[in-house]
């Protein structure tokens, strides 16, 4: 397990500007970064995993994020199993608010008990403090403009899709 290899896990349903900011900053901190689309059974998904992967890939490329960034998905087993498989010793999470700390803390503690993995919290840019995938899903589903909150490829994809698709 290397402290130079990190995983940024999330539902990314869809990827937002907040996600992209965390990915860009984490890519500068670690030698290799795995951006991992994780199936979250607690949330009803808007986009299939393959679509989230494609949008992440396009968004990361269009934003010119540099470094060794690997995009993948994980739907069976623990997140730390993936981390161990790729030798990552770090999980990176973006924190927008105290509510995020409350949500993330038990997962960070349990992941550290399960495996030799540390969780690093990056404080979100205040510009992204209200941006969430759930808000984007709601606005897009009702036909609103989400372009201020999501990368270009996601905005273009969502504006092409009709609200009835979601
Ligand atoms: O973007 P999200 O939905 O807030 O991401 C949450 C996610 C996918 C990172 C979280 O649900 C997760 O870590 N799932 C992996 C399942 C797991 O390993 N659970 C046990 C330890 S917490």
Image (tube, helix red, strand yellow):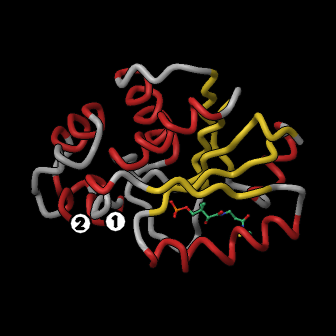
Q: Is residue 15 above or below residue 55?
A: below
Q: Is residue 141 above or below residue 84?
A: below
Q: Is residue 89 above or below residue 152?
A: below
Residue at figure coordinates x 25%, y 32% from the top left: 152
Q: Is residue 120 above or below residue 134?
A: above
Of the pair 77 and 33, the residue shown nearer to us: 33
Question: Mark 1 and mark 2 in contact (Cβ < 8 Å)?
Answer: yes
Q: Which residue is mark 1?
A: 134
Q: How many marks?
A: 2
Q: Quadrant of the C terminus?
A: bottom left
Q: How busy is the neighbourhood of tag 2: few (under 14 within 10 Å), some, or many (20 plus)?
A: some
Q: Quadrant of the N terminus?
A: top right
Q: Is residue 6 left or right of residue 39?
A: right
Where is residue 33 shown, x and y percent of the image?
A: 65, 34
Where is residue 10 shown, x and y percent of the image?
A: 55, 54
Q: Which residue is mark 2?
A: 138
Where is residue 61 shown, x and y percent of the image?
A: 42, 21
Quadrant in the rendering for residue 79 = bottom right
């Amino acid at each position: 397990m290397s402290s130079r290899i990190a995983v940024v896990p999330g539902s990314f349903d869809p990827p937002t500007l907040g996600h992209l900011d965390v990915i860009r900053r984490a890519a500068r901190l670690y030698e290799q970064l795995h951006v991992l689309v994780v199936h979250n059974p607690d949330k009803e998904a808007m986009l299939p995993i393959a679509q989230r992967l494609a949008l992440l890939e396009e968004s990361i490329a269009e934003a010119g994020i540099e470094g060794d960034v690997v995009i993948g998905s994980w739907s069976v087993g623990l997140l730390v199993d993936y981390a161990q498989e790729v030798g990552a010793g770090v999980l990176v999470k973006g924190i927008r608010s105290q509510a995020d700390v409350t949500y993330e803390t038990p997962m960070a503690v349990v992941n550290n008990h399960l495996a030799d993995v540390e969780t690093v919290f990056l404080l979100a840019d205040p510009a992204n403090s209200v941006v969430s995938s759930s808000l984007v899903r709601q606005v897009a589903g009702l036909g609103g403009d989400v372009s201020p909150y999501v990368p270009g490829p996601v905005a273009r994809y969502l504006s092409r899709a009709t609200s009835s698709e979601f």
